[in-house]
Image: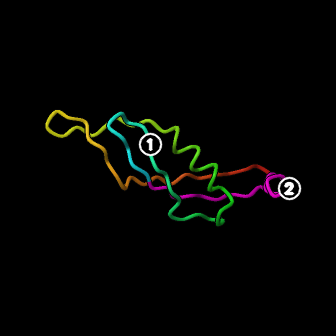
Amino acid sequence: RQRQMCIETGIEGYVIVEFTVTKQGTVRDPQVLKAEPESLFDRAAMDAALKFKYKPRVVNGEAVEVAGVQNKISFQIGG
């Protein structure tokens, strides 16, 4: 019901997600740092973050994990 109401009213929002980029360039342990409106898009943002692919950071010729990466994901549902 809440999702349908969002679609009808054309709601927008964003979620800032923090996660670790693994040596393989995949995302691990996403968590929501901030969201507007609160909690409405959290699940969708974390699902999206888990699909991100990055070029791994290389230090001295070796791929390394990078913790604390942040990404702002914006949402816009047309009304």
- Cα separation, mark 2 vs mark 1, equals 31 Å
Classify mark 1: helix, strand or loop: strand
The label number, if any, that marks residue 3 in the structure image: none
Q: Is residue 54 magenta?
A: no
Could you tell whether 30 is left or right of 35 in the image?
left
Q: Earlier in the sequence, mark 2 or mark 1?
A: 2
**What amino acid type should be assigned to the residue bearing mark 2?**
Arg
Q: State the residue at coordinates (64%, 59%).
A: 13
Disc 2 packing (10 Å; few <14; some 14–19; many ≥20): few
Q: Which residues are magenta?
A: 1-18
User: Of 11 and 64, which appears nearest the observer?
Assistant: 64
**What amino acid type should be assigned to the residue bearing mark 1?**
Val
> What residue did someone put label 1 on?
27
Q: State the residue at coordinates (64%, 48%).
A: 44
Q: State the residue at coordinates (31%, 48%).
A: 66
Say which quarter of the image contains residue 28: top left
Q: Which percent across, then down, holds residue 6? A: 79, 56
Q: State the residue at coordinates (84%, 52%).
A: 4
Q: Is residue 12 magenta?
A: yes
Disc 1 packing (10 Å; few <14; some 14–19; many ≥20): many
> What residue did someone put label 2 on?
1
Q: Which percent across, then down, holds residue 20? A: 39, 49
Classify mark 2: helix, strand or loop: loop
Could you tell whether 69 is left or right of 76 in the image?
left
